[in-house]
Image (cartoon, rainbow, N blue to C red):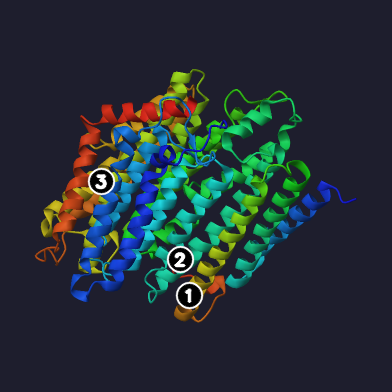
């Protein structure tokens, strides 16, 4: 952050999607007031289409990050780089798809405030992926999370929904208070709130070289991040919230808040504790990378082993999401690579994995929404005969589960391939092997669901599952993206992720 | 003369009391109050660091103001959620709210 004079118009592209989201929030609120009951479905279309349109704004060439390398805007609050671009695109698309798949859900689909809260949460997530100041980090994190507490409780008369909201709220605000204490210590040690100035101050001669307090602050911050990305051992809220919250909310929580938190995670640790940073004779990077590797192993093992015994499909996907956070943390740990090329690849693999995970998980949850709306059941056993009831739905869920398991031609294969490749490049072969072994365990419980859908019989086989046109589009688009990312689309998206990773190190 | 470390000691003590409260209290409202204690510990930290170390840079003050705002928003949403749980279950004791497990 250098002291160039403030130029309002030049600063605007860095927060273009956020400005658009603020306007959209007001539009949706207005529609909610004035639309008659018969036309309230349109609120969802307006919100979804608006979010999808805003997903293009980060890609407009004229609004690309400036070439002069001065990427910090609004007094250093946000950094307008390719990493924030790629994550904003996936968060906005996740928001749009969530709106489209909430339309027919009982007690939710026709309520304007539901879409309003989704939009505000998306706003927070977008800011979070670009935040480059401790104040902005905290503010964006809470702007994203507080609406999610409300969304989890959205079905007020359903005691499961209320309970999941309360658990999410208590765990969430506890974790963010712990993280905030870490941030306040970091501010105290350096006197700076900008992420990029903190590292500068630590390397300067004014800093008294004592690593222990800084490591303490780092551990507190990791607790907060571990909660947001639902990594074990901070995962206790995940299964309860995923099961109790309304299913569209579960879909949104599992992709948008996770993707934004991973964007911030890599940005925060690369900016504040870069590889060159040495306090005394302690390389700070060694410490946090090991912390990430431990979190990765614990999350993968806990997620996959506990998922084996689940009977509820939403709970199964919750434990699967804990395991997926573990796989992604392998990529974060691989930032310890010696070469810049290896570090870039590690960050890029995290970006690519989150991109493919967003669409895969939304596809899986879209099928589950249709199924639970039609049958009222969430147990895996009741999926029996789905292939005969509705062959397309069964196929879509199969694609999603195969992608989560990492089987080609679905996108998950390349996602895992890039992660494990980055780990091997960074001399973390043992971590890649643990990841592969865990994928094999995970394959079992995904295949069990597929077997139930295709082999088991049920008495309801002659009742097809109704599907409105917006769900056809949601399923079609997400399934297409999952297949394209697993075949021809992998290379261009990974190149984009590589450029986004490169922008972190410049 | 009150030194910086005295403020930090108070903040750390308050933070630990907050953590203890969150982990040991059974009433959801008490847990919420304990979380507010932790946020206040952060505020003492921030203001003390700002006053003693970088009084020329307003970052710490601004941070404190935002922590206040977020804490208020969090309390508002949290109490609303707790009321909604109470309407469903007639209890705000966290051990009684146990529909979702394993």
Q: Is residue A369 above or below residue B3?
A: below
Quarter of the figure with the N terminus of chain A: top right
Q: Nearer the viewer, residue A286 or A56?
A: A56
- In which chain is the residue bearing label 1? B
Q: Tell me if mark 3 has few (under 14), some (14-19) or many (20+) residues whose alpha carbon lies within 10 angstroms of its own.
A: many
How far apart are the alpha carbons under marks 1 and 3?
34 Å
Q: Position of residue A353 (x, y in %)?
A: 36, 37
Mark before the other along the chain sequence, 3 or 2: 2
Tell me if A406 is positioned left or right of A465 in this view.
right
Q: Position of residue A491 (x, y in %)?
A: 27, 26
Badge 3 vs badge 2, beta-carbon distance below 8 Å = no
Query: In the image, what residue occupies the spot 43% across and 65% down?
Result: A150
Task: Say which element carries label 3.
Answer: helix
Q: Nearer the viewer, residue B38 or A331?
A: B38
Direction right: furthest residue: B1
Query: In the image, what residue occupies the spot 24% across and 53% down?
Result: A49
- In which chain is the residue bearing label 2? A
Tell me if A77 is positioned left or right of B1 in this view.
left
Residue tagged by mark 1? B85
Badge 1 vs badge 3, beta-carbon distance below 8 Å = no
Which quadrant of the figure has residue A24? Answer: bottom left
Q: Nearer the viewer, residue A194 or A309?
A: A194
Q: Is residue A203 above or below residue A27?
A: above
Residue tagged by mark 2? A165
Q: Is residue A76 above or below residue A318?
A: above
- In which chain is the residue bearing label 3? A
Task: Say which element carries label 2.
Answer: helix
How far apart are the alpha carbons under marks 3 and 2?
27 Å
How far apart are the alpha carbons under marks 2 and 1?
9 Å
Residue tagged by mark 3? A400
């Amino acid at each position: 952050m250098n002291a160039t004079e403030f130029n309002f118009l030049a600063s605007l592209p860095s927060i273009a999607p956020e400005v658009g989201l603020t306007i959209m929030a007001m539009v949706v609120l207005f529609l909610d007031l004035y639309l008659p009951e018969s036309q309230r479905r349109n609120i969802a279309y307006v919100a979804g289409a608006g979010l999808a349109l805003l997903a293009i704004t980060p890609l407009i060439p004229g609004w690309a990050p400036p070439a002069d390398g001065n990427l910090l805007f609004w007094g250093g609050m946000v950094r307008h780089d390719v990493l924030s671009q790629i994550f904003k695109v996936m968060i906005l698309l996740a928001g749009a798809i969530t709106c489209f798949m909430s339309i027919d859900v009982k007690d939710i689909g026709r309520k304007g405030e539901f879409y309003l809260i989704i939009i505000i949460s998306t706003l927070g997530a977008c800011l979070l992926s670009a935040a480059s100041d401790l104040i902005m980090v905290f503010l964006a994190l809470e702007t994203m999370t507080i609406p999610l507490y409300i969304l989890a409780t959205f079905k007020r008369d359903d005691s499961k929904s209320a309970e999941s909201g309360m658990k999410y709220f208590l765990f969430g605000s506890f974790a963010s208070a712990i993280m905030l204490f870490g941030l306040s210590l970091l501010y105290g040690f350096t006197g700076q709130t900008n992420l990029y100035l903190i590292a500068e101050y630590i390397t300067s001669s004014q800093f008294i070289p004592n690593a222990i307090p800084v490591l303490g602050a780092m551990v507190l911050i990791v607790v907060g991040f571990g909660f947001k990305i639902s990594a074990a051992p901070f995962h206790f809220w995940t299964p309860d919230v995923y099961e109790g919250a309304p299913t569209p909310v579960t879909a949104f929580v599992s992709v948008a808040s996770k993707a934004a938190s991973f964007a911030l995670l890599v940005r925060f640790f690369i900016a504040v504790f870069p590889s060159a940073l040495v306090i005394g004779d302690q390389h700070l990077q060694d410490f946090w990378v090991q912390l990430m590797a431990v979190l990765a192993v614990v999350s993968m093992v806990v997620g996959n082993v506990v998922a084996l015994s689940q009977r509820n499909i939403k709970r199964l996907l919750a434990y699967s999401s804990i395991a997926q956070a573990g796989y992604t943390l392998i990529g974060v740990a691989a930032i310890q690579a010696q070469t810049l090329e290896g570090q870039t690849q590690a960050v890029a693999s995290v970006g690519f994995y989150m991109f493919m995970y967003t669409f895969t998980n939304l596809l899986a949850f879209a099928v589950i929404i249709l199924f639970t709306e039609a049958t009222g059941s969430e147990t895996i056993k009741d999926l029996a005969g789905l292939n005969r009831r509705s062959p397309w739905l069964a196929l879509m869920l199969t694609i999603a589960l195969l992608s989560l398991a990492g089987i080609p031609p679905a996108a998950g294969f390349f996602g895992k391939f890039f992660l494990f490749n980055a780990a091997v490049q960074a001399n973390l072969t043992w971590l890649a092997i643990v990841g592969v072994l865990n994928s094999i365990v995970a394959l079992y419980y995904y295949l069990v669901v597929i077997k139930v859908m295709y082999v088991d019989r049920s008495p309801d086989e002659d009742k097809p599952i109704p599907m409105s046109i917006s769900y056809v589009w949601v399923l079609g688009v997400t399934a297409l993206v999952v297949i394209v990312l697993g075949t021809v689309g992998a290379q261009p998206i990974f190149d984009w992720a590589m450029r986004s990773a490169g922008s972190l190190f410049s | 003369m009150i030194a910086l470390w005295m403020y930090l000691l108070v903040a750390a003590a308050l933070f630990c009391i907050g953590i203890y409260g969150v982990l040991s209290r059974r009433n959801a409202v008490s847990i919420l109050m304990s979380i507010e204690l932790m946020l206040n510990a952060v505020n003492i930290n921030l203001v003390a660091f700002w006053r003693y170390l970088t009084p020329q840079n307003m970052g710490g003050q601004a941070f404190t103001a935002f922590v206040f705002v977020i804490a208020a928003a969090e309390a508002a949403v949290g109490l609303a959620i707790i009321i909604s749980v109470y309407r469903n279950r007639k209890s705000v004791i966290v051990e009684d709210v146990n529909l979702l497990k394993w």
